[in-house]
Structures are given as C-alpha cells and as structure tokens.
C-alpha cells in the first residue's frame, strides 16, 4: 500500500540498492534529502557505499526536496519514510543533509531507540535539538576562515568584496557566516543573492568594482546555464574570485571546496561503530576537516594578482574548457 | 702347520681389523661431535644476528618516534598562530611515512578562566558535543571537573569515530600517563609512558613532548612550567610494530616478548609472539637459543626477550652422515687394503658432493633475503656475498671473493664521507668488534653512497677463537633522507634557507661553552632591517619576502665561512662572528652595514633604500646565559635604533646606554604608580599664527608626570619607555579624556587644541570608537580638535592610519603630521595622507640661521604645503631671528620657547587673556 501510493504521486524511493542478500546481515538505511544526479548528494552517497558495502544490507531513499520544494510534500515524505522505517526496522539510519533531519528525524525519532547518524547539516545542529541519545554525526562547515586567509595572502590590500549567491535560506545563512568572519579580517562584504541567471550575471559584472568576489552556489537558479555563466566570467572577470563549492570552481579563480565523500564516509564509519555496540551519544559530533584547493588557470590569467607558490603547488587544476 | 699359519695370519688380520675399527670409530665419533658443535655455534650466531636485527628494527622504530615528535614540536614553535589544517596535513604525511605510528595528538593547556570561552568556540566551530572531561579518582569520566588548568586533547590524527572520543579529554587526569606528561612539561624533553591501552587499538606506548609560548624552549624549569601551552603525543600500538620485529626471523619458531621490567604481570607485556610451545621428547634433545636485550627507552626500562629451541633444520646432518659413510668406507678400504684390494677416493667423493649441495642450499637461502650479507674468513678475506650485497657494493661475488673485506665493503662515517672506517681491515682481524650495530655510509665501487644499518659479528668456534666475520646490512637511504629532511626543516628558516632562531640559540650555547672551556670568544651581532616594514606594508608580503632573500644573499657573501648566520624572525638576523675581538667585529659589521646601505631594493618601479641597525656583544659567561647574551645584543641593537637607526652599536660591560635601556623597565612601574596616584598633569604650549592673524590660535596639549616627591618629570624621561612597553595607548586615552573635560569647562570655540596620538594607539582596536564616544560624552565642538600624529606612526601602518584619519575628519576633526621631513620618504606618502597641517621637524628649524640645507628643506616643505593647501607649523622656534626667517618662507604657524613656553593648563575663558599671556611670555624670553 505504501509503495502504490508513492507510485501514484510519481516520486517513490528512486533507488533501492541491495548490496548484500544475506538475510542475517545488519540493516542500514541511507536517507538522502536530495536526488541522484545532484553532485553533493552523489558525493555523500559514494562515501556511504564505499564504507558500508560489505558490512550491511543497505537501502537508500531519496527525499528529492530540490525538485519538490513544497512544504506539504516534505512533511508527507518524512511521514512515508517514518512508516517505512517502522516496517523494515533498520539497525541504523543515516540522514544526509538538513531536510532529512528536519522532516524525518526531528518529528519522529528524537530520543527514540533507533540510532541515527546525520551528515551534511549546515553549521549548527542546535535548532534540531541535537545532540540526543540516539543521534550523532558530522556537521558541514565551509572553510570560511581559510578563504579569507587566502584572499589576504593573494590581495594584501583588499578592503571590500561581493558575495554572489542564490536567494535561498542556506545561502542567506552562508553569507552571514562569511560576513561575521570578514569583519575579523577588516574586510567589507556586500550581499548579492540572485534569483535568475541574468540577475547573477549583473551582480557578477557589478562586482568588478570591488577588490574580490566570493561565489556561493548556483543551485536554486532554475534557468541556470553553465556555458552562459562561463562566457560572462571569461569576458568580464578581472577581479580575483574564490568559492567553496566544487561545482562553482569553473567560474572562480580559486576554489576551496568541501568534500561530500568525507561526510558520507564519516557517517558510514559512525554507523559501523554503532553496529559494533557503541551508543551514538558516545561518538562526538564533529565538523568536516578537509577541503580541496582548485585553481582555474584560464581565469587566473585574466586577473592581475600574484598567487603564492605554495597555493599553486598544492592546488588541483580545474578542467579548462 | 698350514692351519697354524692361517690361524696366525687370521689373528693378525683380526687384530689389525679390530685396531682399525676401534681407532676409526673413535675418530669418526669425535669428528661428528665437532661438526655438530660448529653447526650449533653457527646456528646460534645466525640466531643472534637475527635477534640483533630485530632489536635494531625495534630501536629504530622507537627512535623514529623521537624524530617525529621533535619535528612536530619544532614545527609548532615556528608557527605564529594555531594552524590546525596545516597540522593535519603535516600529521597525515608523518603517518604515511611512519606506518607504525598509530596516532598524533595535540594537548592544549586551557586555564580555568578560559575554559567556558574555549568550549564555546569549539562548539561554534562545529564540535557540537565538545566539552572538557576527565577521569575522576574512581576511573569514571566526569564532564565538569574543577581545576586550575586543563589539558584536553584538541587535535588527533587520524580522526575517526572511535578516536574522536579523546577530543576534550583531560590527559592529565589519567593516572598512568600523568607522570610522563608532568616530566615532559618540566623537562622540555621527550618522555614515554609505561604500557597503556591506545584508544581501543591494543597495548602500546605514548611519547610526549611539550610546546611552549614563544619560539624557544625556556631554559629553566620554572619558566617551562609557566610558559607551557601544550604537548604533542605520538602513540605506537605494539601490535603495529610486531610485523617489523617478527620479520627479522625467517624461522617461524622464534618466541619474542617485549616486557616492561617494573611491571611483572601481563599488563607490563607490550609485545608477545609465542609460537614454539613444543613439549615432546625430541624438543628436550636440542639446546635453546636465548637472548635478553635491554631496550630501555626514554626512562622506561624495557627488555626484549628472544628465544627458541633448536630443531633439526638448524643442523646439517648430511655432513655427519657423510663422515659416517667415510668412516665405513675407510673401514672398507682398510679391509681392502689389508686384503690387498683398495680403491681410493670413493667415500671422499660422496662427502664432497654432499658438502657442495649443502653450500648451494645456504646460498639460495641467503640470495632470497632483502638484506645484504657478506661473510669473510679468519683473514677478513671475503668468501661469500649475496645478490643484495652485490648490488649495494657494486662488486660481483666472483670478483670480490678472496679480496679483503675492507676493500669491498667500504664504510664511511655517516656525517663525513671522507672518514673511512677501518674496522674490517687486516690490522683489526684479531680485534673483537663485539656485536656491532651501527649506521654508516656504504660507498659503492662507482662512488654511489648508500646509508646502511649494519650489523656485524665475528664467528667463533667452540673455543671462542675467531673463525670469520659475518656482516648483514640494509639500505636505509630513503628513511635517512626523510629524517635528514625533517631535521633540516626543524633547524632552518624556510624562506631564506638560513638557520632559524632555535638552531641559532643552540649554536650560541656552544659558542658560550667553548668560551667557558677557555677557547676563543666569539661576538654576537644582532641585525634589524630599518625599512622592511615600509616595504612590507606598501608593496605586500611578496615584496617583503623578496627583500629578505636579497638581503640574505648580501649578508652571506660578506661573512666568513666559519661565521654563523641565522634569521631570527621577521626582519631580524643574528650572526655569530667566530673567534673575533669586538673591535674586529665592528669592522666586519661595518662591511655588512655598508653593503646593505649600498643595496637598493626595487619592486614594481619603486626603489627603496634599505638600512640596518646592528647590536654587537661579546659572547662571554660574564654577560650570563645564552638567553642573556641574546638579550644584551637585542638591547644593543635597540640602542642603535634609538640613536637614529642605520648604525652599529657595540655593547661593553657596564654599558651606560644599556643601563638606560634596562632602566626603562623601571619607568613602566613608575608610570603605573603615577596612574594609580593621579600624578599626571596636562601642560600646553601656544602655536601662534605667523602670517595671517585671522587664523585660529592653537595650543599643543603636553603631558607631564610628577614623581613621588612632587617633582615634574620631563616627558622624554618616561615617553620612550611608555612607547616601548605599550603603555602609550593608556596615556593617550587619559590625555584625550582629560583634555576634553578641560575643553568643555573652558568652552572657547576660537581655540584649536592639538592632541598628540602615538602610533600604537592608532592601531589599537577600539581606540577610534573611544575617541568618538568621548566626543559625544563631553559634547565637544570637533573643529576645536586637531590630532597630531608622527610621520613614522602614519607611514608604519599607512592603510589603517588613513582609515583612522578619514573617520575622524568626517566627524569634523583636523590632523597635523608631526616631525615632518624626518623620514626618508616624507613627500612620497604625503599625498596619501589626509592631513591639514604639517609640523616641520624641529631639527630643521633650530639651526635654520646657520645651515643652508635646513633652510632649503623648510622652504621646500612650506612650498609643498602651499601647493597642497596644507598649513605649515614650525616648532623649535627659539628666537626672533628664526621667526622672521620663517615669515619670509611663508610658514603659517610658529611654536617654540621663543613664542611661548609650555605651562600648566588652567581654565581660561577669554581669548584676549591668552593672547596677552602669550605676548608677555615672548617679551620675557626676548628680554
């Protein structure tokens, strides 16, 4: 009955993967807030599978909340997964990204007997009532401090810059975080959150009067076209730009990016600890520790800055078009 | 008769056969016994060599930990701030190079007062469950311990769900490791724990080394305890090093136990590898090989016990069997001989064949191992080498055979390739080399050099006589290079390649020790670049780095090879001039000084003249410890700077200048007392319009201090100390608040008050907000305020000074640039500074009448001021002649004893009374 309903609304568990047919194996459920094909979610999924594939029977449910943003849908989705959990009785559940916590864990499973491991939750978990006895996980933080350190290393006289992102709650929070740290570096940061690609392009052109640009994500701009954005950046980009999103590194001179696989691997390793008998609340909640440095040589050649040698040597190269 | 003869012959034959049988049997038995004894000796020697190899591997692993933790603490001391991300990268590199190290921790000291803020910061950074925990006396974990200082783990690599639990745990609360931590903190050296459980990974050891504030380890115990800021901990799980140790034995029946001597039970057993538990009857027939090696390490008494029962495989029974066959053959031959039918050599051929096969078997075994093996006979002539030895020496076995061991295995001192070791020379044949385990450089016949770990021992027979030598060596070149690289990085400055401060202090101590032993005394030169900050602030850090590299080159080519040059940090360099008098050192320093002076640094079209200030001090026990010698040189350098920079100052015993410098410390105390007892006073000195009487009159606000006897102390007695020891911001705040209070009472909007601000204050967080708040609080009419800042203060941090000035100008205040013209690049920066007045440096004014250059300078400043719309003020105007000359030069304002002396600020409500007073003063001076 549960599955027939899902088929009727056209958004069922998009991918249910069985790695182990052994009926005696532990049961692990991986709930992704998003959908397969979304780069960040795919990275977390890759990390989870890499660790768990030989240790438990793993099922995956995607909430698909990037495509379906309606509040009622998300609440309904949380309820369906809750019913599935009660039916299938997993030994541990991994809840990736904020919506899985907000619509599944918090309403139904806070302080329950089923262990949960969250990952990809942005910056703080206090709003979800974590930590709780049955919950542990990894918080997703951006390398904000490191980004400003790189800006000062590359542009010693920088004073002001623009933060260009998307008009979403996540990006709003992200800007506030950047702005708070910017003040520690005596830098002024202006908020530019776009709803459409043309607005983003205007913001980008306007930012050339500043000393630097920080690029937030593009996710959420529905008419986004990479090629158009790239042409804008190539034609007008004369100021140093930096981003913390991997999928934005093609538009920025330097990228310091979070590694979604790290989130997935940590959550899966924590799940294994729990399966081995460790109570969730004895595994500390920690932030992500690693990020990649990615340099865009083509854009760098358009910008009149000196990038220190140690950054060039330790950076990966972005794929040049 | 015939029967009798036959019987006689038979008896003779029987007697001869019996005699031959008895003699041959005894001889054969003895021979077999000797062969078995020799083989037993060889087997035991081989066992001993392998045990030594295991010991050396284990020792190497333990020493690796010292290397690693020293590198970590050295790295930490070289950093200016905590850099967790860089530490994580560094730690990952270490763990990949040293797989036997299971984890690296950093334990940070948190004083009680900082605890809540620290926990909050960690939680805000994403460690949502972070809190400081400890074990209580019952061994239970508690979350709100109360103590003066906490030592929680703040960093661990690898960070995994099971290791993350250690984050926040106060290591000092664990009684097993607490003693080691305390010793590490007090001694500044590496300490090691007794066996402990390592994060659920099994039993192991933890090595600790403390880190301290500043860039050096304090020299005395009290300072070390006071200045500690954390510790590094490197953990080794015994099971992780087991494979390295066990791999030394190709035989699988060797038992290995590593035991802490003071803990007898199983909890003291670090490593146990028991594989031979034979109790059958055969086992008792064989002897045991048994070695106990003391492996005491960093204060922990540990013994490596290796033993095993010999077995059939240890003996070559084919040789005794051959002997037995030979024995039968000889008997048979004797019998044949006796019968007149003897065939020679049959049994001997069989025996030779067996020996040949045996030799082949041994060679195949030795060819298959990864270490080089060379054996030599009693004369040290090589009789065997395996393939690895061929590769490492460059000699083929057939070429090397018969040659002297010393000519083939060429061993050199690890630190001096020209120092060839003759331990295996013919002269040393009879010498007992013991059980040698050393590191050497091995020279290949094509001059290639390898670092090798060499084990060698003499082979002895049962009587203890040397019968040969066996050498086993392993190529450790890559490990050694890694260790050398890390050691190099710990001793050198990354940017310039010079020694760093740590190494320099070590060299200074050696220099001091040499002097104490009666050797020649050296001279320490402390060098500070004068324009580095300007280059760094105006052109960026890349330019600053390039400048330091170029100056390093200049210094290098101008010093002797024996002298020791180091970068001490920032733009400071240190030089130990070896075996040199102070007079000769002044000559050498002058050469360096002139070379830097002649060098012009250019960056993107801008050219900077670079100067240097140098302080010299004789390295002598009379000065004190190494730290005190450094301090004396630093002080001498400060005196050089204080005397106007770009010069050399040599320290002598009972040096007056240095006593003055040390005396400044006393002034800090006096200044604080003056604050407490309200003994500061405000004076003011008139700044009079010269050309245009409609310009408003200014008063420069001056500070004076009363000593404890009520005597006024001149400002130059305490201001230098206040500037050097960061008391100026407090004084400036007092001056501003008191001045505003006086201005409010005086309520005269026709006067402008010039208030001096120090460079330190301008750059202090919150100072700008303080001024704005005071303006509002006292409702000050801001056009009455003119702040004076010195040219040096403005240029030293141009960006923040400009921002500071712009903000206050937007409030209505004005600015005067004090001591203008004293700097090298005054005019260059003038257009960037939003100033309203230029105060010509008094040194140009006071000799104006006698010095044409000074006149030209003042005239230029007046001209530039007029072009830029900036009014000019001349100070040090001591007489009417100077005033008249300044009037000709179009200077707008004059100030000095010829115009009006400083006087205590009393409330005057009328501008006329001020003017009257001013005229009276002037007349009095002129009269």
Image: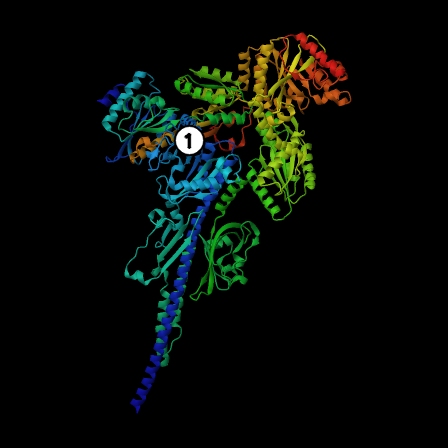
Can you see residue B369?
Answer: no
Residue B603 rendering spot, x and y as whole percentages: 63, 28
Quadrant into which the C terminus of chain B falls = top right
Quadrant (top left/top right/bottom left/bottom right) for the N terminus of chain B: bottom left
Along the line of sight, the residue nearer the viewer: B768 or B437: B768
Left or right for B807, reference A11? right
Secondary structure, mark 1, is loop
Residue B691: tell me if it is visible.
yes
Foreground of the two, B899 or B328: B899
Q: Is residue B865 left or right of residue A161?
A: right
Foreground of the two, A266 or B874 = B874
Residue B170 figure quarter: top left
Marked residue chain, label 1: A
| Residue annotated with mark 1 | A289
Residue A19's quadrant in the figure?
A: top left
- Residue in the picture at 68% in, 43% down: B581
> What residue sits 39% from the left and 32% below the top?
B168
Between B903 and B805, the one lying in front of the other is B903
In the image, residue B701 lies at what x, y percent?
63, 17
The residue under the point 45% across, 62% down is B459
Q: Residue furthest bottom?
A: B1
Q: Is residue B842 above or below residue B363?
A: above
**Residue B298 in the image: x percent, y percent?**
45, 46
């Amino acid at each position: 009955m549960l599955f027939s309903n899902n088929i009727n609304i056209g958004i069922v568990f998009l991918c249910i993967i069985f790695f182990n047919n052994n009926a005696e194996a532990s049961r692990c459920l991986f709930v992704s807030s998003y959908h397969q094909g979304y780069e960040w979610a795919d990275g977390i999924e890759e990390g989870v599978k890499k660790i768990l594939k030989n240790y438990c029977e793993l099922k995956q449910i995607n909430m698909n909340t990037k495509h379906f943003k309606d509040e009622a849908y998300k609440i309904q989705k949380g309820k369906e997964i809750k019913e599935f959990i009660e039916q299938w009785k997993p030994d541990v559940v991994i809840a990736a990204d904020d919506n899985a916590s907000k619509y599944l864990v918090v309403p139904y499973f806070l302080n329950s007997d089923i262990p949960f491991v969250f990952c990809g939750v942005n910056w703080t978990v206090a709003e979800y009532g974590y930590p709780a006895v049955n919950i542990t996980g990894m918080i997703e933080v951006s390398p904000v401090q490191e980004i400003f350190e790189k800006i000062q290393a590359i542009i010693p006289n920088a004073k002001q810059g623009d933060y260009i992102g998307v008009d979403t709650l996540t990006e709003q929070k992200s800007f506030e975080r950047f702005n708070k740290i910017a003040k520690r570096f005596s830098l002024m940061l202006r908020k530019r959150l776009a709803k459409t690609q043309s607005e983003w392009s205007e913001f980008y052109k306007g930012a050339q009067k500043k000393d630097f640009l920080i690029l937030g994500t593009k996710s959420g701009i529905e008419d986004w076209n990479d090629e158009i954005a790239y042409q804008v950046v190539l034609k007008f980009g004369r100021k140093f730009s930096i981003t913390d999103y991997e999928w934005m590194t093609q538009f920025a001179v330097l990228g310091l990016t979070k590694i979604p696989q790290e989130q997935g691997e940590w959550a899966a390793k924590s799940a294994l600890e729990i399966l081995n008998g460790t109570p969730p609340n004895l595994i500390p909640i920690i932030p992500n520790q690693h990020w990649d440095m990615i340099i865009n040589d083509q854009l760098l050649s358009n910008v009149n800055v000196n990038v220190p040698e140690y950054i060039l040597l330790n950076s990966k190269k972005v794929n040049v078009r | 008769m015939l029967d009798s003869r036959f019987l006689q012959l038979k008896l003779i034959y029987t007697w001869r056969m019996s005699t031959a049988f008895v003699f041959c049997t005894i001889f054969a038995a003895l021979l077999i016994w000797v062969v078995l004894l020799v083989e037993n000796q060889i087997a035991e020697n081989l066992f001993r060599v392998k045990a030594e190899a295991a010991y050396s591997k284990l020792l190497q692993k333990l020493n690796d930990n010292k290397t690693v933790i020293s590198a970590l603490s050295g790295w930490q001391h070289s950093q200016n701030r905590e850099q967790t991300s860089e530490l994580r990268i560094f730690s990952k590199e270490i763990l990949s190079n040293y797989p036997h190290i299971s984890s690296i921790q950093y334990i940070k000291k948190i004083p009680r007062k900082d605890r809540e803020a620290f926990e909050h910061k960690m939680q805000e950074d994403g460690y949502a469950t972070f809190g400081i925990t400890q074990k209580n006396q019952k061994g239970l974990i508690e979350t709100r311990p109360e103590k003066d200082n906490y030592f929680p783990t703040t960093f661990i690599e690898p960070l995994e769900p099971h290791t993350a639990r250690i984050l926040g745990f106060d290591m000092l609360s664990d009684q097993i490791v607490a003693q080691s931590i305390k010793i590490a903190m007090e001694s500044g050296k590496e300490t090691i724990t007794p066996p402990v459980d390592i994060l659920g990974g099994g039993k192991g050891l933890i090595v600790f080394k403390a880190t301290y504030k500043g860039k050096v380890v304090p020299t005395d115990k009290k300072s070390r305890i006071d200045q500690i800021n954390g510790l590094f901990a490197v953990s080794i799980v015994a099971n992780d090093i087991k494979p390295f140790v066990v791999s030394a034995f190709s035989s699988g029946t060797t038992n290995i136990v590593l035991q802490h001597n003071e803990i007898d039970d199983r909890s003291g057993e670090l490593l146990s590898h028991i594989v031979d538990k034979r109790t059958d009857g055969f086992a008792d027939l064989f002897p045991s090989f048994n070695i106990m090696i003391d492996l005491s390490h960093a204060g922990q008494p540990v013994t490596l016990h290796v033993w095993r029962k010999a077995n059939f495989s240890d003996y070559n029974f084919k040789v005794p069997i051959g002997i037995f066959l030979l024995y039968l053959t000889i008997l048979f031959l004797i019998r044949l001989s006796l019968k007149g039918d003897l065939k020679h050599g049959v049994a001997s051929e069989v025996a030779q064949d067996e020996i040949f096969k045996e030799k082949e078997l041994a060679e195949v075994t030795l060819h298959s191992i990864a270490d080089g093996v060379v054996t030599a006979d009693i004369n040290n002539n090589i009789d065997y080498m395996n393939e690895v030895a061929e590769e490492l020496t460059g000699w083929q076995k057939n070429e090397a055979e018969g040659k002297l061991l010393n000519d083939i295995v060429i061993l050199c001192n690890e630190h001096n390739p020209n120092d060839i070791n003759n331990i295996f020379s013919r002269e040393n044949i009879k010498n007992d080399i013991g059980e040698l385990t050393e590191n050497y450089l091995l020279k290949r016949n094509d001059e290639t050099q390898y670092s090798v770990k060499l084990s060698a021992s003499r082979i002895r027979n049962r009587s203890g006589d040397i019968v040969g030598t066996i050498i086993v060596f392993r190529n450790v070149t890559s490990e050694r290079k890694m260790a050398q690289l890390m050691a190099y990085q710990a001793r050198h400055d990354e940017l310039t390649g010079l020694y760093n401060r740590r190494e320099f202090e070590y060299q200074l101590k050696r220099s001091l020790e040499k002097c104490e032993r009666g050797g020649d005394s050296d001279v320490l030169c402390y060098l500070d670049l004068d324009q580095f900050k300007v280059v760094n602030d105006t052109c960026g850090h890349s330019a600053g780095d390039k400048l330091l590299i170029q100056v390093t080159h200049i210094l290098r080519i101008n010093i002797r090879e024996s002298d020791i040059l180091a970068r001490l940090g920032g733009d400071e360099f240190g030089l130990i001039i070896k075996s040199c008098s102070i007079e000769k050192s002044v000559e050498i320093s002058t050469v360096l000084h002139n070379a830097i002076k002649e060098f012009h640094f250019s960056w993107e079209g801008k050219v900077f003249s670079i100067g240097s200030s140098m302080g010299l001090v004789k390295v002598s026990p009379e000065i004190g410890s190494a730290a005190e010698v450094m301090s004396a040189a630093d002080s001498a350098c400060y005196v050089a700077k204080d005397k106007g920079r770009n010069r050399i100052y040599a320290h002598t015993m009972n040096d007056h200048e240095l006593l003055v410098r040390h005396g400044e410390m006393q002034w800090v105390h006096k200044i604080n007392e003056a604050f407490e007892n309200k003994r500061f006073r405000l004076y003011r000195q008139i700044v009079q319009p010269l050309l245009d009487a409609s310009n408003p009159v200014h008063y420069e606000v001056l500070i004076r201090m009363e000593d404890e006897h009520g005597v006024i102390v001149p400002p130059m007695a305490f201001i230098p100390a206040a500037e050097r020891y960061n008391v100026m911001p407090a004084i400036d705040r007092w001056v501003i608040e008191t001045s505003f209070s006086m201005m409010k009472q005086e309520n005269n909007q026709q006067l402008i008050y010039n208030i001096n601000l120090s460079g330190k204050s301008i750059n202090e967080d919150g100072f700008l907000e303080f001024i704005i708040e005071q303006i509002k609080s006292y409702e000050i009419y801001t056009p009455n305020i003119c702040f004076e800042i010195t040219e040096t203060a403005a240029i030293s941090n141009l960006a923040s000074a400009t921002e500071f000035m712009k903000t206050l100008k937007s409030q209505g205040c004005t600015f005067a640039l004090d001591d203008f013209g004293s700097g090298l690049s005054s005019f260059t920066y003038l257009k960037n500074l939003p100033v309203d007045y230029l105060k010509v440096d008094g040194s140009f004014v006071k000799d104006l009448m006698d010095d044409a250059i000074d006149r030209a300078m003042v005239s230029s400043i007046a001209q530039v001021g007029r072009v830029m719309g900036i009014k000019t003020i001349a100070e040090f105007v001591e007489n009417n002649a100077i005033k008249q000359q300044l009037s000709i030069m179009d200077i707008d304002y004059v100030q000095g004893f010829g115009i009006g002396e400083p006087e205590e600020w009393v409330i005057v409500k009328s501008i006329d009374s001020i003017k009257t007073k001013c005229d009276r003063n002037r007349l009095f001076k002129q009269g």
